Image: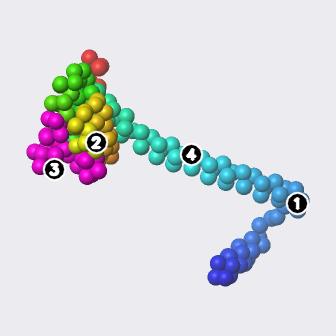
Amino acid sequence: MPKLLFSRIRLYEFKDLMPNMKRPRRIDIVLNCRRRKKDIQCVSVQKCNDEMYSSKLSCQTDHELHLEKLLKDKKYLAAFHSFLQSEFSEENIEFWLACEEFRLTTSPEDLQWRAEEIYREFIQPTACREINVDQRVREKIKQALEKPNLSCFDEAQKHVYLLMERDSCPRFLHSDAYLSLKRKSRTLWYL
């Protein structure tokens, strides 16, 4: 009820302000004006929604693309690793790199001891460089150690990757280390 009352008051205020304005006499002109205003409003709302969606999309994929580039380029990877060391979270990148190296293992004997080594160093609850994964993932990896395969660390690696993508990478992209490295790579390109 209050909304209706408020809108009537507003309508009366506008009517009081409008007596000095010339009004079109033809109804088709009035209808066309109303139709054009609605079309303009619809287009502007759609444009705003599209811009907001594209900016959210670019923001989401921006860090993802940057992390992929960071992990592929040796210079950026070294800078990202030293940045994570300064934040005392280098175990994330080291675990991710160890998993990537583990996937390249071909012999079953090497697979067994590398899997145990990764588990002791990163997954085990008393590990010196323990990563942040939940208990379910830990138990799943522990069971997979009996007969390890190339994908036994996939879930933990994906979790660590997403953690770096959402947390560490955005801070690194705004850090002085990244910005100076980016400037240096641009100037070397021009030389």
Is residue 123 in the magenta section?
A: yes
> Which residue in the structure is indicated by mark 3?
125
Specify whether 7 is left or right of 108. Answer: right
The residue carrying mark 1 is 27
Q: Is residue 72 visible?
A: yes
Magenta stretch?
Answer: 116-139
> Whole-percent x and y of residue 178?
24, 36
**SS of the residue at dot 3?**
loop
Give how far apart the Cα atoms at labels 4 and 2 are.
Answer: 35 Å
Amino acid marked by disc 1:
Ile
| Disc 3 residue crowd, few under 14, some 14–19, many 20+, Cα 10 Å | some
Q: Give the total of numbered labels.
A: 4
Marks 2 and 1, the one that precedes in the sequence: 1
Left or right, 27 with respect to 8, comes to right
Where is the C terminus found, in terms of image quarters?
Answer: top left
Furthest residue in direction top, as rendered: 191
Residue 50: which numbered mark, if any?
4
Taking 35 as reference, is 175 above or below it?
above
Amino acid type at circle 3 is Pro
Residue ID at (25%, 33%)? 148
Q: CA distance from mark 4 to mark 3?
A: 47 Å
State which mark lies toward you, 4 or 1: 4
The residue at the point 22 percent across, 37 percent down is: 146
Q: CA distance from mark 2 to mark 3?
A: 14 Å
Image position of 91 with respect to 33: above or below? above
